[in-house]
Amino acid sequence: MLKRLRHPLAAAGLALAVAVAGIGLLVLPQRDRSGRLDREIASTRAQVASASAFVKEYHPEALDSADLFRLSTALPSSVGMPDLLLQLQRVADSAGVVLNSVAPGAVQQRTGYRAIPIALTASGSFYSVSDFLLRLRSSVRVRGSNLDVTGRLYSVLGVSLRQPVRGRDLQVSLTVSAYAFAGAAPLPASPKGTS
């Protein structure tokens, strides 16, 4: 009779050991995976909500052909060095500044745009030099939601003034940067499963 009891007890013990091992090897790792999947689902939902908010706020119809023309004037698709030099000369002439030298630097590739550094030396009165700087800086302005463009986009990176020995004109050394468009910026990626 004890032999019969030992055999079922051993079988029950073995069954219990297999059940505990099965839980440890099969169920618990799936619980960790389930938690990881829950976090991924929450992250994907947040991305979908962000993309939905972007789509609700983005109004492509608000950008008309006149805006595109103004934008392409401010940020042309090519460096266009002859046009750039002519525009600098026009701005200098209208401000009453004499350009003595213009030395474009190497084009620098940036994310979505190209920067063209230019070293300038010029001469003129304090007021004409100030007017020249103002015209460069205000060739592209944003007023409210309107883009006001009279020329290319420039930034003035450095100014050095010195007065000559004779005469009243200042000698000015400038470092400016002009910009060109370098390609389309990607829109936010759409969530998987939607088109």
Image (cartoon, grey):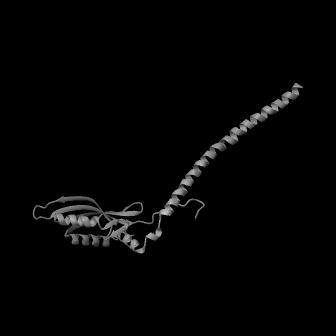
On the question of residue 122 being in view, the answer is: no
- Nearest the viewer among 123 and 16 is 16
Q: Quadrant of residue 161?
A: bottom left
Relative to 38, 2 lies left or right: right
On the question of residue 72 being in view, the answer is: yes
Instruction: Give the quarter of the figure containing the C terminus.
Output: bottom right
Extreme residue in the top direction:
2
Extreme residue in the right direction:
1
Residue 22, position as x, y percentages in the image: 72, 39
Q: Residue at x 44, y 70 (%)?
A: 62
Residue 93, position as x, y percentages in the image: 22, 72
Q: Residue at x 37, y 71 (%)?
A: 70
Residue 64, position as x, y percentages in the image: 43, 73
- Nearest the viewer among 136 and 174 is 136
Residue 152, position as x, y percentages in the image: 32, 69
Relative to 175, 124 lies left or right: left
